[in-house]
Image (cartoon, rainbow, N blue to C red):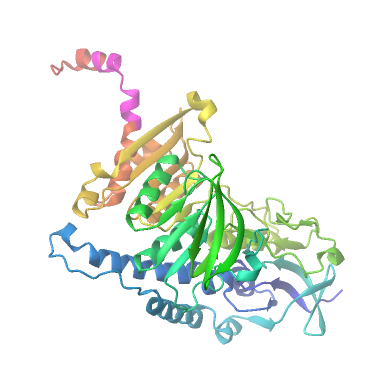
Amino acid sequence: MIYDYDLIVIGAGGGGLTAAIGGASIGAKVLLVEGEKLGGDCTHYGCVPSKALIRAAHIVHANKDRSSVGLSDRDHGSINEAHDVLRHVKKIVADVESRFEDPEEIKRKGVDIEMGYAKFVDSHRISVNDQTISSKKFVIATGARPANLPIEGLEDVVAKSNRDIFEPDSFDSLIIIGSGPIGCELGQAFARLGVDVQIITRDDRVLSRDEKEASQIVGKSLKEDGVRVYYSRDINRVFLRDGKKAVTVTDQKSRKSQEVCADEILVAIGRQPNVENLDLEKAGVLYDIRKGISVNEKTQTNVSHIYAVGDVATKWKFTHYANHMSKVALANLIFHYPTKISKVIPRVTFCSPEVASIGVSTQDIADKQSLYHVFDKAYSDVDRAITDVNENGFFRIITDTKGMIHGATIVGGSAGEMINEIALAMQNGVSITQLSDTIHAYPTYGYGLRNCADQYRALSYTDSKKSWVKKIFGLRGR
């Protein structure tokens, strides 16, 4: 059978664009179908606007902290600058979109584009804009959307999500439901820009999936920036009171209730995959409403010529992982090269200080500590952190007894950049000894990472070994 296309990609977020442009670059006839905007959530509602907001908040915060570097203090008050910054954020999003997601540029790279919502007719055909199009292979990359909470009254007050929080609205106070990466990043950023921020969480600490020490540092930093966090709270209902949006919460231990009010509410409790309205049943593709499309290590669904990548097909909802999955999909569906998706996935929360992690944590190995070594190094022991007055953080590397790296957490300045070195080591079987032996530029934060790795050698240099070395080489030290 002759198909209209070699490959149809459904969804033009990070994963979809990688699959479509990558497929066209190696000779495939590709159609990219998108129902909303090229670039998807990352460009318009996630990574790009949030990092632009965080950067502006960092500049405002640094300017208020002039005395820490020996400059005279200036009273900047507590002016709400969020509205002006959000207008700047919109410009940044438009700039990124014009540079990397311009439809004409993508077409010049050999990709046909159809703006509309695709539905499967059968396993080789989709319907979009009242036309039926066939393809030999498919990649589904429809992403995910903000998860909803079944809370009484929440729909009536029209709470915000990451899809509309970056609109240049004016609000002086904000309640954030959820204390994960999105809640912490945006809560801190808006607080630094002069917004009164309150975070409500069911957990007993922020960033509950990260190391406890990381959570403690971020929690303290949020408090210093004026964010009030209500820990271990259940939400009873949401309602309007005197022009404000109010939330009734109950303490999980004392069972006492209280009312929290603000101009706006942001729900940041996770994401759910976009699997509805694709008519996946007609294609025979298996999926779960909450978990998304089921794929194997090749990103292949149960239908051999249909693949799925990114947020719609994994619990790791990161743009960089969606891009990786797309590359794996292309290797398999075009070249039939049996490539598998990697389990080495770096994660970064871009608050201040940054929290970067990969692999296992100390919580994961709590019941098998004898099989691992944990090496810590404080930022306060790193020269670059001292010169930058940025000592709030730590390095942690977890290895097995042979020195192979199984996980790491870095909290502090440039943590998100340094975790990539650990990812490279883990992906390629580089031991902590090799990391220690690699020359790192001084003075950098990366030098502190190397110092942390140095501890593995010291671990094996016992007093008994030291005694023998002294005897053999005639050394006279203590």
Judge whether 382 appears above or below 83 on screen. Answer: above
Residue 458 lies within the magenta run: yes
Identify the residue at horizontal 38%, vertical 52% (top origin): 418
Q: Is residue 42 left or right of residue 131?
A: left
Q: Position of residue 386 (x, y in %)?
A: 20, 49
Judge whether 419 appears above or below 76 on screen. Answer: above
Q: Quadrant of residue 463?
A: top left
Query: Foreground: 249 or 464?
Result: 249
Identify the residue at horizontal 45%, vertical 74% (top origin): 171
Image quarter hosting the N terminus: bottom right
Principal SS element in the magenta part?
helix
Query: Foreground: 454 or 374?
Result: 374
Regarding residue 428, the answer to whether it shows in the image is no
Q: Position of residue 319 (x, y in %)?
A: 55, 63
The magenta segment: 456-467
Identify the residue at horizontal 81%, vertical 60% (top origin): 285
Regarding residue 131, the answer to whether it shows in the image is yes
Q: Is residue 148 left or right of residue 92?
A: right
Instruction: Residue lying at the far front in this picture: please name it.
Output: 242
Q: Is residue 84 left or right of residue 231?
A: left
Judge whether 270 appears above or below 169 on screen. Answer: above
Q: Position of residue 136 (x, y in %)?
A: 79, 70
Query: Foreground: 232 or 95?
Result: 232
Q: Position of residue 10 (x, y in %)?
A: 70, 72
Identify the residue at horizontal 44%, vertical 52% (top origin): 229
Image quarter hosting the C terminus: top left
